[in-house]
Amino acid sequence: GGSRFSDSVLKLKPERTVEGIKALVAELRGRELPGMANPAVMRVLVTDFVKRWQAPVAVLLRETEALVVEGCHGIIANHVKGEGRLQARFKAEVKEMARKAISDVRDVDVAKLFENELEPQTENHYFLDTCNKIKHDALLTALDKCLDSHQASEVALDKTALRGSLVQALTQLVSIGSSNAEQEANELHAILAAYFKTAAKRFIDACTMHIDRCMLQGLGEAVEKTLAGLADGEDKDVEALFDEDQTMRVRRAYLENKVARLSVARQLLVSHGPTEAQATRAVVKGIAGSDDAGAIVRIMQHSSSLEVQAQGCKRLGKLWANLEDVVAEGVV
């Protein structure tokens, strides 16, 4: 999450072009000398740019809260077992503390960071180093463009012609002969590009440090105090943490009642139904009067009674003898 947050802030580019800055300079022109950085213009440009950091910060805070809650809930599930309400209570407490911690970071710490960043300021040498690098890169680009155009020409280039081409390229680069507003806009564009890089890095570090202090370090202390407070509560409150929740209690009562009704029904069936001996005699009698050999075999396979087995063998023997007589009569 931190890496994505850093990338999302650093990839933001100023929305105003040089022409847009030039129009703003003309609109907010004060009494300062041309070429001086206009504070009013700088404030507007910085404010517009800093406000665009709010979206990446919101994503970072939301993802941090979700990851912290998910991790804490996993730890609670692994260490707090049972069907009581203790696990659910711990999870609810942690979720609420994470929400409050993120809310405090957003409404206090990060809000103060945004307020401070609206006033452009820095003591970091990285600002001027970057500003000079931007101008240096522009110089190299202008020289490369000039040399490439002469390299593509078949006409021999003497020292005077080369000098004239380089002077022309440098003149365009530093805006010699341009209007005051255009020169000021170009200068502000380079200054702002360097400042935004410096300010963005500063903001990323400060923002992640506040989140680390309030969420990753402060949340652990808050959880410890909360759990200690729950353990030090009154007996009935502590006992309630280990009690079943309402849904589980209703379900358990329903099942216990159902088991009780089924037990009563079983007793009624046993007391009013046939005994095992009576049931066996009924099966033996049925086998004795049956002419279905397949049905008799199936009954014998599913019965462990010796009386049933004996009657089955006896009846099958008679059926087999009758079958032999029928076959014999047919042959004669």
Image (tube, helix red, strand yellow):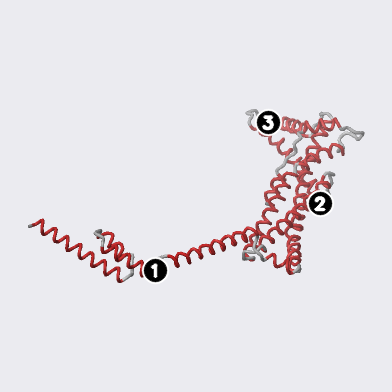
Residue 114: where, in percent of width, then height? Answer: 80, 46
Q: Which mark is residue 157?
A: 3
Res. 75 in view: no
Left/right placement of residue 290 relative to residue 23 reads: left
Q: Is residue 56 above or below residue 144?
A: below
Indicate which disc, 3 or 2, sits on the residue closer to the N terminus: 2
Front position among marks 3 and 2: 2
Please determine whether, in this image, residue 239 is positioned above or below residue 20: below
Instruction: Please tell me which residue is depicted at 70% across the width and 56% down the height of the picture.
Output: 95
Residue reaching furthest right? 31
Between the residue at mark 3 and the residue at mark 1, the CA separation in whole angstroms equals 124 Å
Q: Nearer the viewer, mark 3 or mark 1?
A: 1
Query: Considering only order in the chain, which callout, 1 or 3, is on the residue closer to the N terminus?
Result: 3
Of the 4 image quadrants, the one containing the C terminus is bottom left
Compute the Cα span from label 1 to label 2.
Answer: 82 Å
- Taking depth in this image into account, of 320 and 42 the one nearest to the observer is 320
**Marks 1, 2: nearer the viewer:** 1
- Lateral position of residue 226 relative to residue 298, left or right: right
Q: Is residue 319 left or right of residue 3?
A: left
The mark nearer the N terminus, 1 or 2, is 2
The residue where tag 1 is placed is 275
Q: What kind of residue is marked 2?
A: Val
Q: What residue does disc 2 label?
A: 108
Identify residue type, mark 3.
Answer: Leu
